[in-house]
Image (spheres, grey):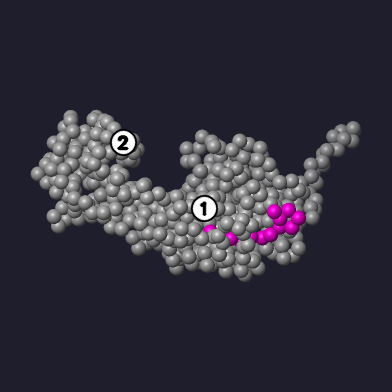
């Protein structure tokens, strides 16, 4: 199978000592890599990242359309439905379904008289902690320098001065610490008065919802027994306070009771949804019980205020990579050319909501995790970031050496023989402040002790913005990066020895 096509020899002097460095290129791998083309990538991406797919929001119609598109691509590639090796795993054809709880933000409004103050306008609340309407007749103003002791505010509603926490965005960090104090003190509600909240809101990128796996949501985490934090624009807060001066209150040195007449109006905050990972399983030959996994999330953030967030790069690029890589391995199998180990190409859902799909798979694996050799994850590989605007073709590689020297070496080998990219390990540093190693789907494999690698091309100005569209994707560079992922997977699936976990696993 291995064909030597390049040999570099150096003859040293009269001793006639010859040293040869042989770089072997797998001609079979090249044959099936050639089936991955830029034109097909563009064709798939133009569909997946179109307005018709409504931003592929997890559990919603657009994501379901994308899942159906992926299934059809795998059917057309001749890849059969999955038969799970674990009898406890729930698989429906090409899908691994799982339930999520969507917790909508913006369900809480403040009402006084006929005036309604709403989320994203006069107020902002980050989590929905209240489940029913409630009347507020008294607020306890707590000055910044007063530290409430444990249980001192049980059942009480609190007003505090947000400006004392500093300027945005540092205000949010200060609020996080302060909120912990109020929770420990037992406060039911904390209204945080902030000057010109409206100027901050456009920079907060408020999500319409957040999600968690249904099996991980505990009823005790929600409800009227937990603390609700709400930022309120200072002008709106003054209207809610009526005759009581917010300016004067901010000068108080001690806690102060303030009579008010405010109603909290709460809409339904939760919705149970079903979403799915999509499975393309190519069974191996003599080492078929061992498995190489490739992942990329195919969901995105959906539609906000009538604007479709198409997510061409995040992660339309990874999604179309899954289609082309699965097809290439399926063609190899149909031609009797392997792979030796089995390959699972798995577009996952729920990444945008907290790596939910990959986490669900890691807790409910379709194939034994003990037999899983590695996960290669692709998330945003279609553009350049500002650090590489004028550089040679590159890719960020994250996590390749965290658990396995062998995974790192396989990727380096694939690149040196085939892709010729500049491999940038900047974000692989354990001191990386962005913590990208923990922010994509590979991490749910890594935390289980499975060597995992994350391909990434960096953050750009359209990240989670409506401008993340197909016309901004560098198809040639995308193609080159996908070939690196394919060849690394090919090496892992076909080399004689399984790569070893020879680095400590994080607790």
Please give the range of residues in magenta. 277-289
- The quadrant of the image that shows the C terminus is top right
Q: What's the CA distance linking mark 2 and mark 1?
A: 32 Å
In the structure shown, which secondary structural element does the residue marked by tag 1 occupy?
helix
Q: Which mark is residue 184?
A: 2
Q: Residues within 10 Å of mark 2 (few under 14, many from 20)?
A: some
174 to the left or right of 330: left
The x and y percentages for residue 329 are 67, 60
The answer to whether residue 279 is magenta is: yes
* Residue under the point 14% across and 49% down: 261
Q: Is residue 136 visible?
A: yes
Question: Circles 2 and 1: CB distance less than 8 Å?
Answer: no
- Towards the viewer: 145 or 83: 83
Q: Is residue 120 visible?
A: no
The x and y percentages for residue 215 are 46, 52
1 to the left or right of 296: right
Q: Count the numbered circles shown.
A: 2
The x and y percentages for residue 169 are 33, 40
In which image quadrant can residue 90 be found? bottom right
* Residue under the point 76% across and 48% down: 496
In the structure shown, which secondary structural element does the residue marked by tag 2 occupy?
helix
Q: Residues within 10 Å of mark 1 (few under 14, many from 20)?
A: many
**Residue with the mark numbered 1:** 360
Prevailing secondary structure class for the magenta stretch in the rendered image: strand
- Towards the viewer: 212 or 251: 212
* Residue under the point 71% across and 57% down: 284
């Amino acid at each position: 199978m291995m064909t030597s096509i390049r040999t570099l020899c150096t003859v040293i002097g009269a001793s006639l000592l010859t040293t040869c460095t042989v770089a072997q290129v797998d001609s079979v791998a090249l044959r099936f890599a050639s089936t991955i083309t830029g034109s097909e990538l563009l064709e798939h991406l133009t569909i997946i990242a179109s307005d018709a797919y409504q931003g592929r929001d997890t559990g919603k119609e657009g994501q379901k359309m994308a899942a159906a598109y992926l299934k059809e691509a795998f059917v057309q590639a001749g890849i059969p439905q999955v038969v799970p090796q674990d009898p406890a795993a729930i698989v429906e054809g090409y899908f691994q379904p799982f339930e999520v709880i969507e917790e909508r933000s913006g369900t809480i409004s403040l009402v006084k008289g006929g005036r309604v103050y709403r989320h994203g306008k006069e107020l902002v609340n980050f989590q929905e902690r209240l489940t029913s309407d409630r009347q507020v007749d008294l607020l306890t103003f707590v000055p910044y320098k007063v530290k409430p002791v444990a249980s001192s505010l049980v059942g009480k509603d609190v007003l505090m001065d947000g400006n004392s926490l500093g300027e945005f965005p540092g205000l949010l960090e200060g609020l996080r610490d302060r909120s912990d104090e109020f929770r420990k003190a037992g406060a039911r509600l904390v209204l945080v008065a902030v000057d010109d909240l409206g100027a901050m809101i456009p920079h907060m990128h408020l999500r319409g919802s957040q999600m968690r796996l249904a099996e991980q949501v505990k009823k005790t985490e929600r409800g009227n027994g937990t603390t609700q934090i709400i930022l309120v624009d200072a002008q709106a807060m003054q209207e809610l306070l009526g005759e009581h001066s917010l300016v004067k209150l901010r000068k108080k040195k001690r806690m102060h009771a303030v009579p008010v007449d405010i109603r909290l109006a709460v809409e339904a905050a939760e919705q149970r949804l079903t979403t799915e990972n999509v499975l393309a399983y190519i069974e191996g030959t003599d080492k078929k019980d061992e498995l190489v996994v490739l992942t990329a999330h195919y969901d995105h953030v959906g539609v906000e205020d009538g604007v479709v967030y198409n997510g061409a790069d995040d992660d339309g690029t990874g999604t179309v990579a899954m289609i082309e890589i699965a097809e290439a391995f399926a063609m190899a199998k149909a031609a009797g050319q392997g792979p030796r180990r089995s390959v699972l190409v798995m577009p996952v859902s729920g990444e945008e909501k907290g790596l939910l799909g990959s986490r669900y798979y890691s807790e409910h694996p379709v194939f034994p995790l003990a037999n899983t050799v590695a996960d290669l994850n692709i998330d945003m590989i279609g553009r350049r970031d500002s650090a590489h605007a004028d550089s040679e073709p590159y890719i960020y590689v994250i996590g390749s050496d965290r658990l396995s020297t062998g995974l790192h070496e396989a990727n380096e080998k694939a690149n040196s023989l085939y892709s010729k990219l500049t491999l940038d390990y900047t974000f692989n540093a354990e001191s990386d402040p962005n913590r990208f190693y923990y922010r994509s789907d590979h991490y749910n494999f890594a935390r289980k002790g499975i060597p995992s690698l994350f391909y990434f091309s960096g953050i750009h100005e359209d990240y989670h913005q409506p401008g993340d569209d197909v016309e901004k994707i560098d198809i040639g560079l995308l193609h080159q990066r996908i070939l690196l992922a394919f060849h690394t997977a090919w090496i892992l699936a076909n080399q004689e020895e399984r790569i070893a976990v020879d680095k400590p696993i994080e607790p």
